[in-house]
């Protein structure tokens, strides 16, 4: 395990270096000038040149890259061009909000998707399987903005059971915050539930046909024991892979939900940075997402070994 973690730590550094370099270069290739974006189209060339000098954008690209990498190695992600705040502060303020949605949506998806997938797998080609498969296909087919808009119209505007999009911090009003988080979580969970359910069904279908499942039933074990201790335990690894992929996708893919519900998260910060040509913000957010994605992959590998003793990581 120690050797594995050390090797993955080295890979992490290499991957982050590649990601940082690619993002840095791509931002410089994208049309648009941060100085012009700050000053507006009516600014003179002298004003633009002055701001570019203040931001260090008039230096050669290699000098900008070396300077930025040196700051990153010291733990300094730079200062936002638009807000003037440290990027680390902006990212820290938004990270908790994004993780709250992602963790709650993933937990809800597992609570719903796993049991439904087991039922569909055990009742394959029967009415429960047909109904659940159709529901999963619907969940996968509907875009997030459609699900979010419909939920908002029904539960916030028409029935008025839940508040509309006006973000409130947990520290300010915990009750109101909990009400506000319900619809974004349901929106994110809609497709994730479908993915987990379909993968659980497929994996269960493969496992229940194995000889050791037939042997367990022949020994007189209860169906509950056969399913939970033998079938699900051997069918869970593909589900873990899917959960890891969904987590990595949600890290930078919640922008639609954040926009619809006015939720200040990482994705909306990233999009705002791209629109404003705010290089430090975009670079900082992408680096953080890359780190979290790699850590999720490592956690998935470790979960494999914990759930299946036959798997060894070294």
Image (tube, helix red, strand yellow):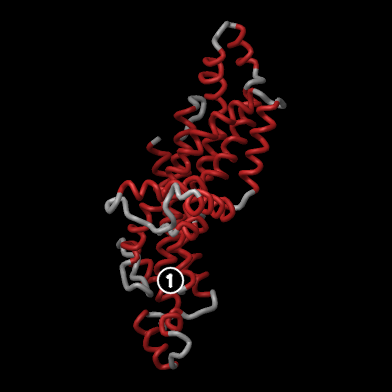
Q: Nearer the viewer, residue 88 or 198?
A: 198
Q: Nearer the viewer, residue 276 or 111?
A: 111
Q: Nearer the viewer, residue 264 or 195?
A: 264
Q: Position of residue 207 (x, y in %)?
A: 62, 23
Compared across the picture, whether 165 is left or right of 153 comes to left
Residue beneath the point at 40% across and 69% down: 280
Residue 285 location, quadrant: bottom left
Kindly give the residue lying farthest to the right in the view shown. 125
Q: How many marks?
A: 1
Q: Is residue 253 above or below residue 223?
A: below
Residue beneath the point at 36% across and 79% down: 55
Q: Is residue 206 above or below residue 295?
A: above
Label 1 crowding class (10 Å Cα cut-off): few <14, some 14-19, many 20+?
A: many
- Identify the secondary structure beneath mark 1: helix
- Image quadrant occupied by the N terminus: top left
For label 1, the residue is 279
Kindly give the residue lying farthest to the left in the view shown. 171
Residue beneath the point at 59% across and 35% down: 197
Q: Is residue 47 above or below residue 114?
A: below
- Image quadrant occupied by the C terminus: top left
Residue beneath the point at 47% across and 46% down: 185
Q: Position of residue 159 (x, y in %)?
A: 49, 48
User: Can residue 18 be spotted in the picture?
Assistant: no
Q: Position of residue 198 (x, y in %)?
A: 62, 36
Q: Position of residue 122 (x, y in %)?
A: 63, 23
User: Can residue 12 be spotted in the picture?
Assistant: yes
């Amino acid at each position: 395990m120690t050797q594995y973690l050390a090797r993955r730590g080295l890979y992490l550094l290499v991957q982050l270096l590649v990601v940082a370099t690619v993002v840095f270069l791509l931002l410089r290739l994208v049309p648009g000038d941060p100085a012009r974006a700050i000053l507006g189209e009516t600014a003179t060339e002298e004003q633009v040149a002055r701001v570019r000098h203040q931001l260090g954008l008039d230096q050669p690209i290699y000098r900008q890259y070396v300077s930025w990498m040196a700051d990153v190695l010291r733990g300094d992600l730079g200062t936002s061009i638009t807000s003037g705040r440290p990027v680390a502060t902006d990212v820290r303020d938004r990270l908790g909000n994004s993780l709250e949605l992602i963790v709650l949506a993933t937990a809800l998806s597992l609570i719903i998707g796993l049991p439904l997938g087991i039922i569909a797998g055990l009742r394959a080609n029967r009415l429960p399987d047909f109904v659940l498969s159709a529901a999963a296909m619907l969940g996968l087919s509907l875009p997030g903005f459609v699900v979010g808009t419909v939920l908002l119209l029904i539960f916030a505007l028409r029935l008025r059971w839940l508040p509309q999009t006006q973000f409130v911090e947990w520290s300010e009003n915990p009750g109101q915050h909990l009400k506000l988080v319900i619809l974004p979580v349901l929106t994110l969970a809609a497709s994730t539930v479908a993915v987990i359910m379909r993968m659980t069904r497929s994996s269960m279908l493969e496992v229940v046909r194995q000889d050791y499942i037939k042997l367990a039933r022949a020994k007189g074990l209860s169906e509950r024991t056969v399913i939970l201790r033998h079938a699900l335990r051997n069918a869970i690894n593909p589900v873990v892979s899917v959960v890891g992929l969904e987590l990595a996708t949600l890290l930078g893919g919640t922008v639609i939900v954040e926009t619809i519900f006015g939720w200040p998260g990482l994705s909306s910060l990233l999009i705002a940075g791209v629109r404003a040509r705010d290089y430090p913000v975009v670079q900082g957010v992408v680096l953080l997402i890359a780190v979290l994605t790699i850590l999720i992959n490592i956690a998935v590998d470790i979960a494999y070994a914990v759930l299946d003793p036959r798997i060894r990581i070294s």
